[in-house]
Structures are given as C-alpha cells and as structure tokens.
Amino acid sequence: MGEEARLIIRKLTTEDADAAAELDLKSFGKKDACSRNYFFQSAQDERKEFIVAVRNGKIIACAGAEIFSDTAEIESLAVDPDCRGQGIGKIILIKLIGAIKKRGASFMVLEVRPSNTAAIELYKGFGFQIVEREKNYYRDEDAWIMARDFG
Ligand SMILES: CC(C)(COP(=O)(O)OP(=O)(O)OC[C@H]1O[C@@H](n2cnc3c(N)ncnc32)[C@H](O)[C@@H]1OP(=O)(O)O)[C@@H](O)C(=O)NCCC(=O)NCCS
C-alpha cells in the first residue's frame, strides 16, 4: 500500500466542515443529514469528540460524540458509500470509543433507525444492546436506543 493510501485518523477541524457535511448528506440524504454549521460548531465544542478518517487526502469517514461527564452520546457516524465494507466503520468506532474513554466517559448511548441493519450490526459487534424504543424520534420512524457500559 502506498504511503498516500494509508488511513489517517485525526480530529475534526473547522476546515473539515464542508467535507464532513457532504459526507453526511451522501450517507443520510437530505432528511437526516447534519449541516456544515453542525460540524463547524462540533469541531470547536469542548464537550464534543469528533474524528475523521482520511485517505488520499479525502475525508472518507467521520464519527463524533458529546460527552456528559461519565456518559457519552454517539451522535454521528458515517463512512463514504464508496468505501463501505472495508472495515473503516469498525476502525473509526474503535478510535472514537478509545478517545471517549480517555476523557473519562464509559457509558455510551446512541440512537439508530430500526431499519438501519448495517449500523445495528456494527454496534452489536461492539457489544451495544438495544435498551429502548423511542417513539417518533425520526419524523417517519421510531428510534432504537442502544447502549453499552465500557467501564
Ligand atoms: C454503518 C456504517 C458506518 C458501516 O460502515 P462500514 O465501513 O461499511 O462498516 P465495516 O466495513 O467496518 O463493517 C463493520 C461491521 O458492520 C456490520 N455491517 C456493515 N455493513 C453491513 C451490511 N451492509 N449489512 C449488515 N451488517 C453490516 C457488520 O457487522 C460488519 O462486521 P463484519 O465485517 O465483521 O461482518 C456505514 O454503512 C454507513 O456510513 N452508513 C450510513 C450512515 C449510518 O447509518 N450511520 C449510523 C447512524 S446510527
């Protein structure tokens, strides 16, 4: 593998906001994607931990969480559709969980569409369990709340 094809994981910066928003739009479509401003703010928010995966100079994955003392809410995770099924979701989630734990949070929670089999299987692989159904969380679907205590 050439040096430039290496996968680099680093923190999200404000300069990444456009690329992160574009990736989110490709991943979730208009109705669920987060805005450029969301990523711009998240990059500067000390309560948040946001990271990106970069290959050949391009952001191909982004993941982030908000930390509330010992609990973290994983609020964003996307892998470029052209790069899925290569283990990148797993890699960025391992890095995100590690970074969250370093900041002292061990209980992790997230919301996912019950129809999102790929994400649910990914989270189950990390030991997350479905703990609750939240009615009408999305405009057109309930959410499953998944959680795991990494402590
Ligand atoms: C969910 C997502 C992040 C997975 O990224 P990925 O890089 O393709 O995932 P990986 O290649 O690392 O696969 C990791 C695990 O996820 C699960 N998985 C991934 N794609 C899957 C699919 N199409 N069907 C079922 N399980 C799947 C598997 O358990 C897989 O482990 P395995 O390879 O040992 O079987 C990606 O599909 C994505 O960005 N989806 C759109 C955005 C999204 O739904 N984000 C989550 C919101 S809560």
Image (cartoon, rainbow, N blue to C red):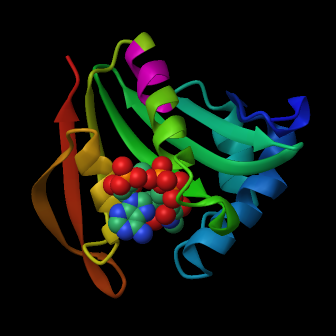
- Residue 101 position, x and y percent, is 38, 17
Pick the front one: 62 or 57: 57
Q: Quadrant of residue 18?
A: bottom right
Q: Quadrant of ligand 1?
A: bottom left
Residue 83, magenta (yes or no): no
Q: Is residue 37 visible from the viewing direction of this image?
A: yes
Pick the front one: 73 or 94: 94
Q: Quadrant of residue 33?
A: bottom right
- Give the residue drawn at x 29%, y 58%: 121
Q: Which residues are magenta?
A: 96-101
Q: Main secondary structure of the magenta part?
A: helix
Quadrant the C terminus occupies: top left
Left or right side of 25 for 108: left
- Residue 84 position, x and y percent, is 58, 61
Residue found farthest to the left: 131
Q: Quadrant of residue 92?
A: top right
Residue 97, magenta (yes or no): yes
Q: Is residue 108 above or below residue 35?
A: above
Q: Is residue 118 visible from the viewing direction of this image?
A: no
- Residue 78 position, x and y percent, is 56, 56
Q: Is residue 29 above or below residue 47?
A: below
- Give the residue drawn at x 20%, y 39%: 127
Pick the front one: 40 or 82: 82
Q: Is residue 86 above or below residue 66?
A: below
Quadrant the N terminus occupies: top right
